[in-house]
Image (cartoon, grey):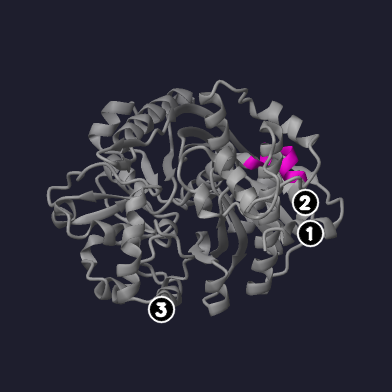
Amino acid sequence: MTRPLTLAAVDLGASSGRVMAARVGSGRLDLTEVHRFPNRPVRTAGTLHWDVLGLYAGVLDGLRAAGREADGGVVDGVGIDSWAVDVGLLDADGALLGNPVHYRDARHETAVPAVHALVPPDELYAVNGLQHLPFNTVFQLAAMRGTARFAAARQALLVPDLLAHWLTGARGAEVTNASTTGLLDATTRQWATGLLDRLDLPRDLLPALVQPGEEIGRLTAEVRAETGLGEVPVIAVGSHDTASAVVGVPARGDRFAYVSCGTWSLVGVELEKPVLTAASRDAGFTNELGVDGTVRYLHNVMGLWLLQESLRTWAAAGLPADLPDLLAAAARVPAFTAVVDVDDPRFLPPGDVPSRIALACAATGQAPPQGQAETVRCIVDSLALAYRRTVRRAVELSGREVDVVHVVGGGARNALLCQLTADACGLPVLAGPVEAAALGNALVQARALGGLDGGLAEMRRLLRTTQALVEYRPSGSAAAWDAAEARLS
């Protein structure tokens, strides 16, 4: 191809969505953010929902902007990645039956006992390989059973699949995101029809699986009129944002761990096959599918949510809420003044995280943080401690040795967190790229459209030669981290 491809990478996060214009060609990989829009959940009648129509409007605005940014107005492809597990239900006419329920809504937990009564946790894990999280799609669907909405539903589409459906008219379930539902067989990489039957969920509720790199469809006439674009192909990428982010890890070889650090931190290693042992299940590790037949063997860590909710709480109270200033102040606070288990369920719902941190410290016999800087230091120390624990456990359970930890996503900007992660893990940390998910999205599109050759190794080589990376070398005492860990025992 004589010119670089121009690709629209739609990357949706829990607090905002972006459309990035990526240009990919020989020795070239760069991104320009052309449109950003808020993603504000809405609570109605006691239920927390996503405003998916607002998100779709933002995507259309972003595609229009991508066309203005592209040379000659030509966009060669579109790919969508987002968070996992949440679904939109369509009726027999293809109409959306209400906005998708947010994974942080408490109703999902009510279905866990009923699901486990039909399929015990060990049997579920032996098939789907997923860490138990009460908001996985299997529990969401079970919680909806018995409602008028569920009775009218004829198909369930995960968020990126729903948006792709509206763009193209085609329906499918991209496999990396489908693997987070709890209804996919981690070994065969197909829908687990036996589980569906045991849980009395209709088999045809779930659409046909689509692989990363497949064309989903072309923009409809309606979308072309809305955006000014032509018959652009929509390409299935790693539509779970972590799947795209792991494609965007600039690793050499396979001896690496990754921390995809955003609202959630996904910490793990890349494998060729799932780990479905009882020890893996007991440790809370998940086997989500990746691009090119890989497995993302990882554990969910609460992530930057703790900082985000703290800043929101402080801003509402009229207190300073500038994160760079608070991180600079936190760097001057002595290490391990207080630490918490960031995976404590009390931190999951929105709300006053600083007060919950104080309660968690008191429960473990520690003095609570005395100010904002101390709270921020507690959070970053505790996150680094969780990353250390998770990387070590992943190595132990999978047998995959690790020489380096890659931090990608928004957390790669957090120099204090990256240095503490290197110190905690006793391994070098390579931070960047920040936009790993959008880059991984664009790389899979480019390969599908003939702009790149090769597999993950070749895509990652292009990342290493085009993206800014920062290395952090480990320092300090492993014994100090051991002592901090012991406080949480």
**Cβ atoms at labels 3 and 2 below 8 Å apart:** no
Query: For mark 3, what is the residue?
Result: 123
Where's residue 262, x and y in %?
A: 57, 43
Please, is residue 79 above or below residue 135 in the view?
A: above
Residue at 23% x, 61% y: name it: 205
Give percent across and percent down for residue 408. 63, 46
Locate residue 487: give its quadrant: bottom right
Which stretch appears magenta?
Answer: 411-419
Q: Which residue is mark 1?
A: 483
Q: Amino acid at mark 3?
A: Glu
Residue 483: quadrant of the picture: bottom right
Q: CA distance from mark 1 to mark 2?
A: 17 Å
- The percent coordinates of residue 246 (x first, y second) are 58, 53
- Which one is in front, 358 or 486? 358
Residue at screen point 57% across, 31% down: 311
SS class, disc 1:
helix
